[in-house]
Amino acid sequence: MAKQEDVFKAVVAHAKEYGFVFQSSEIYDGLSAVYDYGQNGVELKNNIKRYWWEAMTMLHDNIVGIDSAIFMHPTIWKASGHVDAFNDPLIDNRDSKKRYRADVLIEDAIAKFDEKADKEVAKARKRFGESFDETLFRQTNPRVLEQMRKKEELHTRFAEAMNANDLEELKQIILDYEIVDPISGTRNWTDVRQFNLMFKTEMGSTADGAMEVYLRPETAQGIFVNYLNVQKTGRMRIPFGIAQIGKAFRNEIVARQFIFRMREFEQMEMQFFVRPGEELKWFDYWRSERLKWHKALGLGDDKYRYHDHEKLAHYANAATDIEFLMPFGFKEVEGIHSRTDFDLSQHEKFSGKKIRYFDPELNESYVPYVIETSIGVDRMFLSVLCSCYEEQDLGGGDSRVVLHFPAPIAPVKCAVLPLVKKDGLPEKAREIQHKLRFDMACVVDEKDSIGKRYRRQDAIGTPFCITVDHQTLEDGTVTLRYRDSMEQVRLAVDEIDRIMVEKVNLNTLLKKLV
Ligand code: GAP
């Protein structure tokens, strides 16, 4: 089996070759951690966004959407805590002159204990074969238990240092655990410093007194500052939610793993406003609701897990991540946070305006509590791309690369392929395409051999190909080819629309959620 690292490299190369993701400003040697989406990428991305948007706003009577501006009054970021606390702890290696996130270095060291334990398990599995009981082995083997004890010890020390914002202790952990710079291999570290992740720019000319503004690091604050506008104009009653999709910007220091950690990215966030005291009930609701949304895509239930936070942000009283199994391990794709009344109370304080909700059932006013669901579009995109990518050996020296996208989010749903470029077959193919394109993204592809065209469509994840041949002109039948099974069936043209429409329609996914 190919190493996961190699699989990931192949996915990144494939994303470029087939018009999904390009390095930004490539002809100028690129801009680090900034990416552009190509002709297929933008379709996949838009379909993911539509799946989220419709699941939120169409399937919930009490959730509406907004689209707030990227620029906001700078005091918003003071109120939200981002100016003072949206920091990463950084450390430099004096020999390599490279800068790292201290927390990431320590998290990598924590993960090494798991890797060592996994190696013990793999060795034992080889030794015991069929009769191997992994759970029992993990619970009883002294070497595995020792690794787990060391992991727990480091984890506790790390969590305490992070919670206390103790930068000296973070450095001491790096020294005590003999963490070396992956490039220089030395332990010649500087002290740990805090670095703010927000991008700054200026609004207005300096003659007027330019105002320093930030590019938003999350879309959530645009929802908080509009919550009362929406509540009043939409006559919303608690509990209710506001959803938003939009760009966010963070000056990430450790930018790696392709589109996993970017400096400009997109978020899909929903803030759900509830009565104080009811937040944990709603937190549990959204925690399971969001996992349901992910699983409905059918990428494999075993690829998801929850990671409940031990270190809570100062404003949160519960938080969990939904992690997805990427080629580089389980990684956060979405966060669900119980943010208490922190943000709204802060905006009340900093703006001097009352932003309370009058609850007609309780006959009292209060600052609502908030449950947030926050998912990165690009990370979701990456999880779909990685899990759908397959290099298939077809036997006899033949192979193909196929993207098994769930049909409703595939960039192209159907390709109509005239067998030859003459005898009226291209015209017939266009006639079929013109009929189908009101129901789905449908293209005509007439260049190269039919085999090459099938491979090209497999490589961009097109679930259906329709081949038009001479028989089509005689009896109105075509060949329908299924991407995953490569099965081909002969059908009347009028029948294919019915067969495909149901499979490619987003409603197929949405119906699994209700
Ligand atoms: N409003 C809450 C918030 O922004 P977060 O955990 O910082 O919480 C939420 O971000 C989600 O946004 C993450 O789960 C991730 O999917 C995505 N995200 C965060 N930083 C990102 C980055 N630099 N590049 C790509 N996606 C990112």
Image (cartoon, helix red, strand yellow):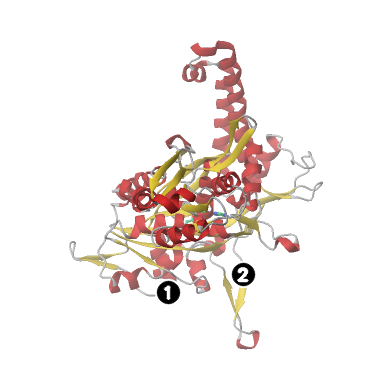
* Residue 160 visible in the picture: no
Does the closest atom of ligand 1 sit within 8 Å of the Cβ of label 1? no
Amino acid of disc 1: Ser
Query: With 152 as the anchor, is 188 left or right in this view?
Result: right
Q: Give 451 or 438, whichever is nearer the viewer.
A: 451
Q: Residues within 10 Å of mark 2 (few under 14, many from 20)?
A: few
CA–CA distance between discs 2 and 1? Answer: 21 Å
How far from the left and from the top, in percent, is residue 290? 38, 48
Earlier-in-chain disc, 2 versus 1: 2
Q: How many marks?
A: 2
Q: Give 394 or 307, whichever is nearer the viewer.
A: 394
Q: Give 375 or 85, whichever is nearer the viewer.
A: 375
- The label shown at residue 351 is 1
Q: Which residue is mark 2?
A: 200
Residue at the location (57% across, 70% down)?
Answer: 214
Query: What SS does tag 1 mark?
Result: helix
Q: Give 256 or 475, whichever is nearer the viewer.
A: 475
Query: With 196 as the anchor, is 485 left or right in this view?
Result: left
